[in-house]
Image (tube, rainbow, N blue to C red):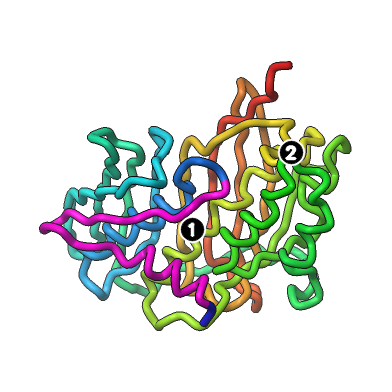
Amino acid sequence: MSSALDGLLDLLDLEQIEQNIFRGRSRSAVVPRVFGGQVAAQALVAAGRTVPGDRTAHSLHSYFLRMGDPGAPIVYTVDRIRDGRSFTTRRVVAVQHGQPIFHLSASFQTYEEGLEHQEEMPDSPDPETLPTAAEMLPRYADRFVDPGVVDRLLEARAAVDLRYVDEPPYATAGRPREPRSQVWFRANGKLADDPLLHVCLATYVSDMTLLDSILLAHGRGGWAVGDVVGASLDHAMWFHRPFRADEWLLYDQESPSASGGRGLGQARIWTQDGRLAITVIQEGVVRVPRG
């Protein structure tokens, strides 16, 4: 296991300070705010710590309320909304400096048999044939407002092996493309056999690239290029089938709409053997900087 993955797992191992109350840390981010995937994953950890072990997460719905301060701890308060025979519901509020910065509702279910169908997995190349972040990012250092962002991005993503199928937005800025994007990802090391951990790792990664397809539609390179500013507004995930976050997962993303300073990203995450594991939807603020 890489030291970076060790650090991420330590970040997700929240301190319990009281019944239903947990405390999390942040680490240095690429931008001066808490990474949204981190706070979402930590909130899901907090919720999962209050749920019986035989129930796994099947959905989450969340809102990003305020920019998080990476230099301050985050306190997660869990509300035990419901414990039913098959489903358990939890609500989590993340607080910094006395104000809520994030709100999450999550539902957990005991395993049961049921009707079964899924869409067919889209075509995609073998992830092992694609360039790593360390191979790709330095090629485009001259595209970024601050070339030092390459090192910060590599450090921030070192716990995860994330590989673009096609060129990322920053590589084709100025050339609009179809609003679709694919990346393969997996944890950079072996993970324990804990379903909650794998779900939380996928939640963490899901916020990294979901709004890319919005940028592609308009030929925008992103915040690091300086031709757009934005932030996540809400985030929803449905976990359909078991998966491992330390095995390759295909993140197939698209944007059906952008308007009113907001853009919508939607995606499906597939296991390498073709099982539909997760559906993701996120809306974000996407604005063109005023000259």
In percent of width and height, residue 136 lies at: 79, 61
- The answer to which image quadrant residue 258 occupies is top right
- Could you say which disc has been placed on residue 97 in the image? none
Left or right: 77 in relation to 223: left
Residue, disc 1: 204
* Amino acid at the residue labelled 1: Tyr
Q: Is residue 63 above or below residue 4?
A: above
Report the number of numbered marks. Answer: 2
First of labels 2, 1 by sequence position: 2
Along the line of sight, which residue is nearer the eye, 37 or 273? 37
Residue, disc 2: 145
Query: Is residue 21 shown in magenta?
Result: yes
* Amino acid at the residue labelled 2: Val
Q: CA distance from mark 2 to mark 1?
A: 26 Å
Which residue lies at the image location 52% right of the left edge and 38% below the top edge? 232
Mark 1 neighbour class, 10 Å CA radius: few under 14, some 14 to 19, many 20 or more: many
In percent of width and height, residue 228 lies at: 69, 31
- The answer to which image quadrant residue 178 occupies is top right
Which residue lies at the image location 15% right of the left edge and 58% below the top edge? 17
Along the line of sight, which residue is nearer the eye, 104 or 77? 77
Which residue lies at the image location 53% right of the left edge and 66% below the top edge? 277
In percent of width and height, residue 16 lies at: 19, 62
**Secondary structure beneath disc 2?**
loop
Quadrant housing the C terminus:
top right
**Secondary structure beneath disc 1?**
helix
- The answer to which image quadrant residue 192 occupies is bottom left
Q: Please provide the residue range marked out in magenta.
A: 3-30
Q: Is residue 63 above or below residue 15?
A: above
* Residue at the extreme top of the image, as rendered: 291
